[in-house]
Image: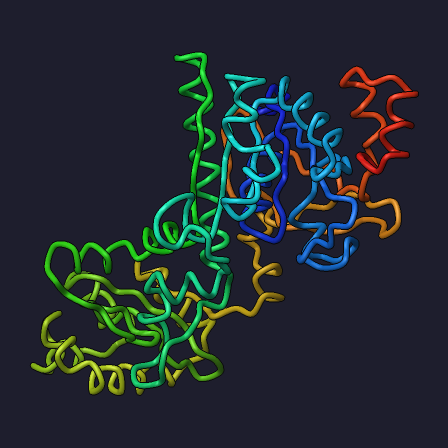
Amino acid sequence: MSHSPLAHITILDLTRVRAGPTCVKQLSDWGATVIKVEGPAEDDMTGARDGSDFQNLHRNKQSIVLDLKHPDGVAVLKRLAASADVVVENFRPDVKHRLGIGYDDLRAVNPRLVYASISGFGEDGPYAARPGFDMVAQGMGGMMSVTGLPGHGPLRAGIPLADLTSGLYAAIGILIALLDRDRTGQGQWVKASLLQAQVAMLDFQAAAWLMEGKVYRQTGNDHPYTTPMGVYPAADQDIVIGASGQGQYRKLCEAIEAPHLLEDARFATADARLANRPAFTTALSAVTRTRKAAAWVAVLNAAGIACGPINDIQQVFADPQVQAHGLAATVGHPRLGPIAVVGAPITLSASEARITLPAPDKGEHTDGLLRAAGYAEAEIAAMRQAGAVG
């Protein structure tokens, strides 16, 4: 029987929209107890509570409603924080301090607390007070400048890349801080931002600028510095072929029975292919158009050449490899019945992700959590009457 590695961890989740919930989801899937703290008038921007986006982002959580503008609401949060392991928030940097729930405020009641902040631009620096959204970070962080077809202007990634990666980096930071706490006995403040994450995701293109002064531009579906590594037409649909290195290229030419692509001086070497990429793409496409995608996928993979179809999302979840890895998980919802959410993308040998609960109704667990924190029924009723809890 596998165990849940984070079952001993309790998280107070003050996040909303996408980056913060993405962070928390990585931890709740592996067993952490997550208490989603919601404001009484809060309208979560991820959409209707029973909708797919909200259910996917907020599965495996409990919900408590606290008015953090009310002193009693803040007092409840601090009582919960006294026994929690992690707090995750993605307010603008000034908001938490105005509410009195910043890192120093909560560390005073629990020095072992790991406090994670995700913001648009960071907790300090000239842009700290700016509002931040995924597409703004994609633009400012360089992603849009290298995405899209040459000459067609900048293009955002088709997924909320800055939101998702900032959440993932924050989750990594939390795990590092928890491991460090085992050694020091002290928590710490983990800080991540959309802009930092987006710049980090530039990876080799960022390194090329920092070390070589090279600025990469848009190359569409072509790899920035090697070919063939891109999208090519089969008889029925486009496919992706990746043949990196000269040895792979020879295998490709043999597998597709196109010795002329190796013999032609314009295409014979990696540098020559890159210098003559438009002509090379035309020549290779003339060959790939002669057979259907499934045939090329089979032939090339058998030859050790990476090749795959370009799936739409319906085709992704019909793919047997995706199904084999359990990337769709089913949970039971009291109103919706069985619903499917995106499964955990990590596999461990001795434990497994547990996606067992749908997103909670707002305030569903307020009373139970308050009782567990030591509040008497009369106190709960008084706080509800005062609007501090819901």
Position in image of residue 243 (x %, y %): 26, 65
Q: Dividing the picture into quarters, in which one does residue 365 lie? A: top right
347 vs 147, left or right, is right
Nearer the observer, 171 or 38: 38
Q: Position of residue 379 (x, y in %)?
A: 87, 21
State the quadrant of the N terminus: top right
Rendered residue at 45%/12% (across/down): 185
Q: Residue at x 88, y 50 (%)?
A: 335
Image mark count: 0
Closest to the observer: 71 or 19? 71
- From this viewpoint, is residue 108 visible? yes
Q: State the image quarter where residue 244 is shown.
A: bottom left
- Would you say 324 lies left or right of 368 here? left
**Horizontal placement of 221 versus 388: left or right?**
left
Coloured how? rainbow
Left or right position of 220 against 68:
left
Q: Position of residue 97 (x, y in %)?
A: 54, 37
**Residue 292: x percent and y percent?**
45, 79
Q: Quadrant of the C terminus?
A: top right
Nearer to me, 85 or 207: 85
